Image (cartoon, rainbow, N blue to C red):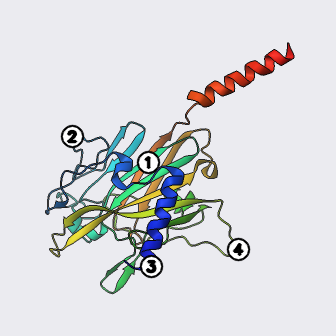
Amino acid sequence: MNRNIRHGLAAAAVLTAACQAWGGLVSWNVSPDLTNYAPGKYANWVPGGGANPNNPFVASTVVTSGISAVIWDGFGPYGHAGSGFAPDASGFGGQLFDAKAMYARNDATTLYVGIVTGFNPAGVLHDGITYHVGDLAVNPDWSKATAAFGLLLPDGAVGTAGQAGVVAGGTWIVPNLATGVAPPPYIDRPLLPDETPLAYGTFSYEDTGVTYTDAQTGQDVPISIYELSIPLASIGMSAGGKVDLSWGMSCNNDSLQLTHEIIVPEPTGLSGAMLALGGLLVRRRKA
């Protein structure tokens, strides 16, 4: 194991302990049935299991136990669009470019996002061009090719983790799940000159232990999960509300969009009891 990967694993362990968010698929209560899937076979990415909602023609949304999820495994908006056939992965680059599922959940301070994809976070070389990890767009406005906020994700090998800057919008082509429309060039948004991030979130790239056999190449493609965190205060969501998320790789061959309702939990348990006790003591002193 090289030093960079060891360092990344160590960083992931520290960050996991800090935010209690990362642990691969277990973070999202997802347990695929197999470890390898043949062409035409798809894992069940639903949190908590149950019927697999995967639909060839449209992304499926699920909300369960505080987790919002969107699932579109093996398909995408640009393959065979308008031809009467299911828009399968072979139409837009195969399993290497397939965005399979996206998850979101939150606690009182932080939004957590999971992305399951065959796209290698270190980048994918295809026909002499290297494609990169796209950024996470937060509250996108596709008509203006921008988003209110973004989490800027760096390229990195599976096993790496670290900080990612939360930034205000700025013009860049956000991932758009527009069925039937050729993929626009999607450009990673860099930090602008003299720009300071609003805050820092975190990222972790991990191997799910699942592979898909690509129908075009016959090769097994490892499936990764990206686990991300964003401070709610940095995107104006400390008091709750709905947040829209969008992610796609830099070529935007595939993308996923998800709306998550942020529920800010009330103080409970010992902390709530201590607050009540504190108020009682103040009133007694005044008396």
Q: Residue at x 18, y 61 (%)?
A: 36
Given residues 18 and 233, the one toward you in this image is 18
Labelled disc at residue 3: 3
Q: Which residue carries the number 1 mark?
A: 104
Cα–Cα gap, marks 3 and 2: 42 Å
As helix, strand or loop, the secondary structure at mark 4 comes to loop
* Residue found at the far bottom of this picture: 128
Tell whether 30 sits left or right of 243. left
Q: Is residue 13 among the parts visible in the rendering? A: yes
* Marks 3 and 1 in Cβ contact (< 8 Å): no
Q: Residue at x 43, y 57 (%)?
A: 227
Q: Which residue carries the number 4 mark?
A: 194
As helix, strand or loop, the secondary structure at mark 3 comes to helix
The amino acid pointed to by label 2 is Ala
Q: Which image quarter holds the C terminus?
A: top right
As helix, strand or loop, the secondary structure at mark 2 comes to loop
Labelled disc at residue 51: 2
Cα–Cα gap, marks 1 and 4: 31 Å
Pick whichever of labels 4 and 3 is earlier in the sequence: 3
* Neighbour tally class for label 1: few under 14, some 14-19, many 20 plus, Cα within 10 Å: many
Pick whichever of labels 2 and 4 is earlier in the sequence: 2
Pick whichever of labels 3 and 2 is earlier in the sequence: 3
Given residues 166 and 171, the one toward you in this image is 166
Cα–Cα gap, marks 2 and 4: 49 Å
234 w.r.t. 277: above or below: below
